[in-house]
Image: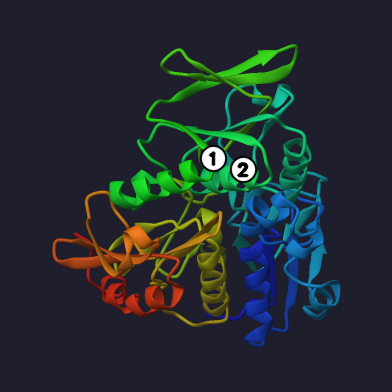
């Protein structure tokens, strides 16, 4: 395999920037271009729902690197110009402004787009939270909001609800699960998370679907539940999931199926790779396709793809890891959790609010969850490593 002389990274994201940094760190001296749809330099997304939204950080603190650090990468950053098409065979990307960018290797890192209600963009007071500008716009409204409804009982929704509550708003969290994150954590830990939110003053309206938005004179007035009830609100945050941002890849020649489908080295086609939230690659350790939406994977996968571009050939078989900060609680997860798993607290005490839980299926430890116990959680990580390096989850 010949080393390319030029690399185009589509997506000025954490995954995109990490790819560039890994290429330079590994000695690549060819041309590098980074194409970004937003006007901002690469920034970190996890702080958006917490530090940036609450105002404990100024917006520029979320930037991943200082200007002089970006300059040292000797890369051409083209910002505020979205990709609208890819010809994988010709390795050419077309942009909104009419540019046609060609490179020997292309890395797709365009991430996710929020799922939304039909017509929500024409109503004032309705927000999503994906970008830095989204966070700043939502923060401005939360400062004066009296009734906030967060639609979505997953990680993002619960983080936003916690932050909005600490800012003093009256907050209701709505979603179809019986408890927040139950489909990820299982009922035991999910009920513990529900109690945390209830104790801090978040109203929970769970176990029923949200069917749409109520409006009055062009402004959101609440959300409709499947029961027929309406939850009143002057601010609504829609956070019921995201989808891979792959629309621009229609007709590209890549296989698109819940993300960009790749081989075990994250290669989507000859000279084309995918990294981050939209990459769905074959995890050889598990024997299945996997797509991870977390910050740690963005960095680790980017480093792997950079190595592959430069001629290394090995499968990418990470142990998934993510964390979430809600109120004063940090929850960390290594491996894969499942509602069908047997959950056992092995360190600490659930009642004391500090514990580590193991998730087991068929005699195999598949995941570790830590609640305010980071050191002990890290020590237990080794118990899931074998699962992700060749022992399939049953």
* Residue at 66% from the left image edge and 88% from the top image edge: 27
Q: Toward the viewer: 5 or 168?
A: 168
Is residue 390 depicted above or below 343 in this figure? below
Q: Position of residue 203 (x, y in %)?
A: 51, 34
Q: Which residue is mark 1?
A: 201
Q: Position of residue 37 (x, y in %)?
A: 74, 50
Quarter that holds the C terminus: bottom left
> How many neighbours does mark 2 have within 10 angstroms: few (below 14), some (14-19), or many (20 or more)?
many
- Distance (Cα) linking label 1 and label 2: 7 Å
Task: Give the side of residue 265 with respect to residue 393, left or right.
Answer: right
Q: Is residue 102 visible?
A: yes
Q: Toward the viewer: 282 or 300?
A: 300
Q: The residue tagged with tag 1: helix, strand or loop?
A: loop
Q: Residue furthest bottom?
A: 27
- Contact, CB < 8 Å: mark 1 with mark 2? yes
Q: Toward the viewer: 271 or 223?
A: 223
Callout in the foreground (1, 2)? 1
> How many neighbours does mark 1 have within 10 angstroms: few (below 14), some (14-19), or many (20 or more)?
some
Residue 379 position by quadrant? bottom left
Q: The residue tagged with tag 2: helix, strand or loop?
A: helix
Q: Which residue is mark 2?
A: 165
Residue 257 position by quadrant? top left
Q: Toward the viewer: 7 or 61?
A: 61
* Residue at 80% from the left image edge and 58% from the top image edge: 58
Task: Give the side of residue 25 with respect to residue 334, left or right.
Answer: right
Q: How many marks?
A: 2
Q: Position of residue 231 (x, y in %)?
A: 55, 21
Is residue 159 depicted above or below 271 in this figure? above
Is residue 190 depicted above or below 24 in this figure? above
* Residue at 62% from the left image edge and 48% from the top image edge: 163
* Residue at 68% from the left image edge and 73% from the top image edge: 20
């Amino acid at each position: 395999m010949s080393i390319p002389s030029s690399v185009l990274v589509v997506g000025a994201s954490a995954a995109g920037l990490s790819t560039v940094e890994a290429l330079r760190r590994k000695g690549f001296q060819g041309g590098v271009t980074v194409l970004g749809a937003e006007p901002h330099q690469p920034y970190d997304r996890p702080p958006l729902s917490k530090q940036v939204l609450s105002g404990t950080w100024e917006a520029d603190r979320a930037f991943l690197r200082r200007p002089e650090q970006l300059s040292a990468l000797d890369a051409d950053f083209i910002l505020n110009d979205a990709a609208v098409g890819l010809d994988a065979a010709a390795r050419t990307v077309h942009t909104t402004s009419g540019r046609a960018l060609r490179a020997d290797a292309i890395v797709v890192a365009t991430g996710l787009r929020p799922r939304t209600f039909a017509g929500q963009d024409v109503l004032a007071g309705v927000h999503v939270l994906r970008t830095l500008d989204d966070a700043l716009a939502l923060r401005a409204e939360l400062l004066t909001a009296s009734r906030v409804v967060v639609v979505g009982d997953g990680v993002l929704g619960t983080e936003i609800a916690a932050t909005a509550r600490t800012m003093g708003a009256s907050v209701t969290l709505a979603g179809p699960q019986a408890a927040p994150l139950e489909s990820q954590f299982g009922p035991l830990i999910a009920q513990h998370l529900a109690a945390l939110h209830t104790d801090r003053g978040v109203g929970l309206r769970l176990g029923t679907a949200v069917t749409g938005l109520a409006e009055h004179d062009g402004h959101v007035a609440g959300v409709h539940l499947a029961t027929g009830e309406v939850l009143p609100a002057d601010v609504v945050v829609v956070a019921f999931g995201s989808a891979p941002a792959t629309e621009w890849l229609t007709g590209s020649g890549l296989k698109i199926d819940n993300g960009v489908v790749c081989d075990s080295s994250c290669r989507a086609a000859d000279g084309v790779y995918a990294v981050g939230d939209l990459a769905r690659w074959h995890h050889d350790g598990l024997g299945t396709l996997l797509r991870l939406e977390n910050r740690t994977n963005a960095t680790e996968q980017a480093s792997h793809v950079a190595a592959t571009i430069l001629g290394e050939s090995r499968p990418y078989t990470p142990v998934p890891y993510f964390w979430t900060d809600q109120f004063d609680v940090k929850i960390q997860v290594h491996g894969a959790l499942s509602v069908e798993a047997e959950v056992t607290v092995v360190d600490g005490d659930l009642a004391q609010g500090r514990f580590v839980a193991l998730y087991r299926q068929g005699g195999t430890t598949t995941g570790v969850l830590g609640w305010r116990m980071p050191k002990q959680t890290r020590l237990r990580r080794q118990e899931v490593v074998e699962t992700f390096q060749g022992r399939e989850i049953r």
